[in-house]
Amino acid sequence: MIPACRRLAALCALGAALGALAACGTAQQPRAPRPTAPASASAAPSHPSTPLSHAPAAPSRPPTLAPGPAGLTPVFRNAPHAPGKTVALTFDADMTADQGGRAAAGEHFDNPGLIAALRKLKVPATVFMTGRWADEYPDQARSIGRDPLFEVANHSYSHYAFTDDCYGLPTVPEGRMRADLERAYTAFRKAGVPDAMPYFRFPGGCYDRRALRAVSGTGVTAVQWDVVSGDAFATDANAVAQQVLQGVKPGSVVVMHCTRSAAPTTEQVVRTVVPELRRQGYRFVKVSELIGTTSARH
């Protein structure tokens, strides 16, 4: 009996050793890095090919649209087929590369009251920011970029036009268009904006096939709108609010501005429009949610 017991104990010990060896040989998959908006905004996060069930899930990249014909940058305007009554309020934080002197003289290209109103009303929003604005107001850019209520998107660095004859704006040469877009992402990172979105709004909303081709390959989706608020240089907040309310439909993208000097009524417009749209059953979302519903349909 004793030899038999010894053999059984030896087999048990061997089994335990083999089990421990097998456990040591199971490598834990590394955590996939959180993607950040690169200068080109085109880098995708790396994912383990065979993730283990206990490994943390990698964050998904923000939704974008597939390139258009001939690989041109895709353009998004609204999401009429989005489920429910959703609307995205977008705000252009405009400042051109040559307006530093005006800012130094006291002109306000920011609008902290508007941002405070959006926070108080708990309204998600997308801020299309120029790199020059982020350079001028880095603390505000960082505060907006780190607030989960908002998302920061690209409005170029210089706010110079990507086409000829665009509201009198200076024009970016075709060979510098991509660099101007990428320079804005560099400015965002310098200001402390951690995850600027891969969305680009052309200055003035002006673009053509040449401009779409110039920024293709950067991974961005160009974002336009279907509701013009008319807040730029407006002095009658009620008239602007009525224009927004009359234009909004499910899936709409509304364009407004985050610039006190050029759009002084926008804060009051928001305080009027938001409660009324909520009364009508609308839910406010960021542009990324609307693009996500659109890309899912394709």
Image: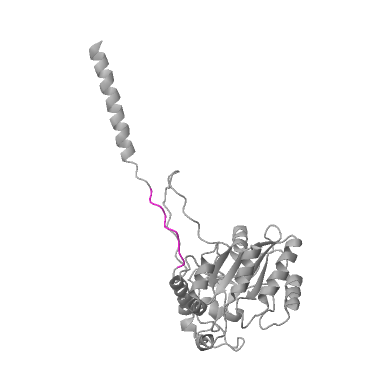
Residue visible at 55% across and 61% down in the picture: 148
Q: Residue furthest left?
A: 3
Q: Quadrant of residue 27?
A: top left
Q: Name the chief secondary structure element in magenta.
A: loop
Identify whether 152 is placed above or below 26. below
**Colour mapping:** one colour
Q: In x, y percent, where is residue 63?
A: 55, 62
Q: Quadrant of residue 210?
A: bottom right
**How many numbered discs sit on the rendered protein?**
0
Residue visible at 73% across and 70% down in the picture: 272
Q: Is residue 36 magenta?
A: yes
Residue 197 visible at all: no
Q: With 107 as the anchor, is 230 left or right in this view?
A: right
Q: Is residue 229 magenta?
A: no
Residue 82 visible at all: yes
Q: In x, y percent, where is residue 231?
A: 68, 79
Q: Quadrant of residue 290?
A: bottom right
Q: In x, y percent, where is residue 76?
A: 61, 69
Q: With 28 as the anchor, is 201 left or right in this view?
A: right
Indicate the quadrant containing the C terminus: top left, top right, bottom left or bottom right: bottom right
Q: Which residues are magenta?
A: 29-37
